[in-house]
Image: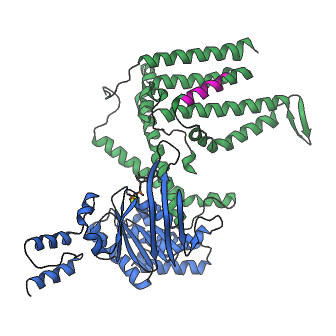
Chain colours: A green, B blue
């Protein structure tokens, strides 16, 4: 059940996408997300969808694995779609009692749904193909200019890398505690909402305790190794752009231009 | 009554690139009342194996039977099964969550839907069985020592009155005294209650004195399954898979090699003492 959450997990395999520089992937993902909000028509979404499918294909990550993560956000997706469907004013398509579905609402709901699915898939693909270390190294490098205005870039990326590193650990821990409580007859999967919420206590209390214990250990270990922040720190594997990365950036640029031209400017 | 595993295979993360076989063609029969040691190197599949026995994990292929019923049948009541096959996880103190020990032990029996009186009676009995002091009953479990926490956790499973008690590395992370206490406690439980016990460990030394049967796991397969004596006679093969026979077995082997007329199939200190005294003619 919890293993279904793929957001933030790394999927180890070899592929062109895995080998790309993390900075290229971050820029690519952001461009992709922005493009989703810029396109205004059907063709734009087809282009975005195609781009995504090609990237998934190239990444060697089984689509099944990516879409397993979708189950976790299904609820959110449904709420968004329902709200858009019923609460958008416009020409009524069908109406009964006080509720009406408008043509605009339907269009908006579908658009929102597609947007959300693409958004989650796109960002999952980035974390699935990039190790947390690489990801935060890339982010730190991209945000470097902000250091000039005293944004603690290193600290932020350090926190992010720790958070990302802890996702699988806490997941495993959750799995273990859940099993241990199930062995004592706990039931997490049936009953009313109230009962289910109550049944989470035996899971959450030990989980929080373990998270605090781990955080404490980590802080101690960092201190024991004289960690003192980013000033003057060097990297074992500094990031260097390679030929592939340049091609990658060019392709991303091409994609964004395509999206803008076909999805916004040419066909309104 | 018994647990039977029939050609069980288990693969973690099946159909992903991380797929790894944790159990390979495991067939076992666990009859009633036996005291069994399940030994293997870290990662040999011990924990995975025992989680099959109470239905927490479903085999990728093969069947698990409890009292001649397939526990993975759709309409099989897993909750009842988990009351009958009690499983104490590794570091069970990490699962404690209530504000006092007594309440925590009540969690298991309450989940079985028993009336409040019965729940409390069982919790009381279980805490007594693990030798827990009355004074600590209403203390927060988080204020206790490691060994005491572990007792509470074991009581939490005992309170469900299981017919089979499985303990995953119950001595991990305890000091020698705590280790011996827990092992003696388990041995006593076996003697007084007559339940089946499966004791998981990566140390032969831990189990040699207590168990009547040893199952050795290696890379997801059952490597040996016999009486301690028989298993330890393969001490060379055991070393190859990263395990070792108890110290006394080596001691007796060396004495024999040095020309003393002693038996080498010795597993406990007591036996060794008698054998050596005999060889010395005393
Ligand atoms: N939750 C899990 N996900 C993926 N692989 C696992 C998981 N748990 C165990 N494994 C793998 O299965 C194998 C057997 O593990 P385990 O049963 O825990 O062994 P043991 O208890 O003997 O140390 C190991 O190779 C381990 O890496
Ligand atoms: Mg284990």
The answer to whether residue B56 is magenta is no
Looking at the image, residue B214 sits to the left or right of residue A171; the answer is left
Residue B9 in the image, given as x and y percentages of width and height: 48, 58
Is A210 drawn above or below residue A259 in the view shown? below
Residue A24 in the image, given as x and y percentages of width and height: 48, 22
> Which residue does the image show at 41% across and 85% down from the upper left?
B192
> Which residue does the image show at 58% across and 21% down from the upper left?
A31
Quarter holding residue B213: bottom left
Query: As drawn, which residue projects farthest toward the bottom?
Result: B282
Quarter holding residue B270: bottom left
Looking at the image, residue A207 sits to the left or right of residue B241; the answer is right
The answer to whether residue A54 is magenta is yes
Closer to the camera, A227 or A116? A116
Q: Is residue B97 visible?
A: no
Looking at the image, residue B245 sits to the left or right of residue B258; the answer is right
> Which residue does the image show at 13% across and 80% down from the upper left?
B276
Is A19 drawn above or below residue A265 in the view shown? below
Residue A167 in the image, given as x and y percentages of width and height: 48, 44
> Which residue does the image show at 69% across and 24% down from the upper left?
A45
Main SS category, magenta section: helix
Closer to the camera, A45 or B237? B237
Residue range corresponding to the magenta coloring: A47-57
Is A104 drawn above or below residue B27 in the view shown? above
Q: For ligand 2, give the image quadrant.
A: bottom left
Is B204 drawn above or below residue A110 in the view shown? below
């Amino acid at each position: 059940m919890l293993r279904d959450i793929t957001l933030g997990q790394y999927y180890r395999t070899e592929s062109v996408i895995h080998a790309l520089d993390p900075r290229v992937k971050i820029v690519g993902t952001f461009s992709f997300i922005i493009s989703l909000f810029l396109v205004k028509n059907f063709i734009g979404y087809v282009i975005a969808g195609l781009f995504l499918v090609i990237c998934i294909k190239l990444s060697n990550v089984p689509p099944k694995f990516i879409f397993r993560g979708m189950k976790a956000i299904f609820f959110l997706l449904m709420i968004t779609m329902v709200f858009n469907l019923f609460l958008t004013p416009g020409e009524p398509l069908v109406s009964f009692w006080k509720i009406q579905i408008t043509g605009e609402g339907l269009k908006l709901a579908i658009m929102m749904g597609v947007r959300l699915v693409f958004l989650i898939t796109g960002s999952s693909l980035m974390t699935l193909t990039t190790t947390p270390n690489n990801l935060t190294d890339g982010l730190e490098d991209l945000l470097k200019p902000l250091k000039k205005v005293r944004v603690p870039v290193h600290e932020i990326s350090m926190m992010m890398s720790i958070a990302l590193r802890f996702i699988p650990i806490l997941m495993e821990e959750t799995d273990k505690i859940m099993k241990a409580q199930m062995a004592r007859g706990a039931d997490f999967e049936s009953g009313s909402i109230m009962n289910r919420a109550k049944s989470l206590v035996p899971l959450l209390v030990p989980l929080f305790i373990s998270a605090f214990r781990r955080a404490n250990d980590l802080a101690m270990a960092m201190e024991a190794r004289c960690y003192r922040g980013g000033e003057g720190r060097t990297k074992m594997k500094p990031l260097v752009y390679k030929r592939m990365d340049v091609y990658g950036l060019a392709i991303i640029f091409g994609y964004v231009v395509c999206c803008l031209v076909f999805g916004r400017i040419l066909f309104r | 009554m018994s647990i039977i595993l029939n050609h069980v295979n288990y693969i973690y993360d099946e159909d992903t690139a991380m797929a790894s076989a944790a159990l390979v063609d495991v067939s076992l029969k666990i009859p009633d009342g036996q005291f069994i040691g399940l030994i293997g190197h870290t990662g040999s599949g011990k924990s995975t194996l025992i989680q099959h026995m109470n239905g927490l994990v479903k085999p990728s292929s093969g069947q698990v039977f409890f009292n001649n019923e397939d526990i993975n049948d759709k309409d099989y009541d897993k909750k009842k099964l988990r009351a009958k096959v009690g499983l104490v996880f590794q570091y069970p103190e990490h699962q404690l969550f209530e504000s006092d020990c007594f309440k925590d032990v009540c969690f298991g029996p309450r989940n079985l839907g028993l009336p409040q009186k019965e729940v409390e009676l069982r919790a009381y009995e279980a805490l007594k069985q693990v030798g827990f002091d009355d004074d600590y009953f209403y203390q927060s479990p988080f204020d206790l020592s490691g060994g005491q926490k572990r007792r509470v956790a074991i009581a939490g499973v005992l309170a469900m009155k299981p017919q089979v008690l499985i303990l995953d590395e119950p001595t991990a992370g305890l000091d020698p005294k705590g280790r011996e206490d827990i092992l003696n406690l388990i041995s006593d439980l076996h003697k007084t209650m007559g339940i089946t016990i499966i004791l998981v460990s990566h140390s032969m030394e831990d189990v040699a004195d207590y168990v009547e049967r040893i199952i050795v796991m290696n890379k997801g397969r059952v490597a040996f399954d016999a009486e301690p004596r028989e298993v330890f006679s393969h001490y060379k093969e055991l070393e190859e898979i990263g395990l070792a026979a108890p110290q006394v077995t080596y001691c007796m082997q060396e004495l024999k090699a040095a020309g003393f007329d002693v038996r080498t199939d010795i597993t406990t200190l007591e036996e060794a003492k008698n054998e050596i005294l005999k060889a010395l003619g005393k």
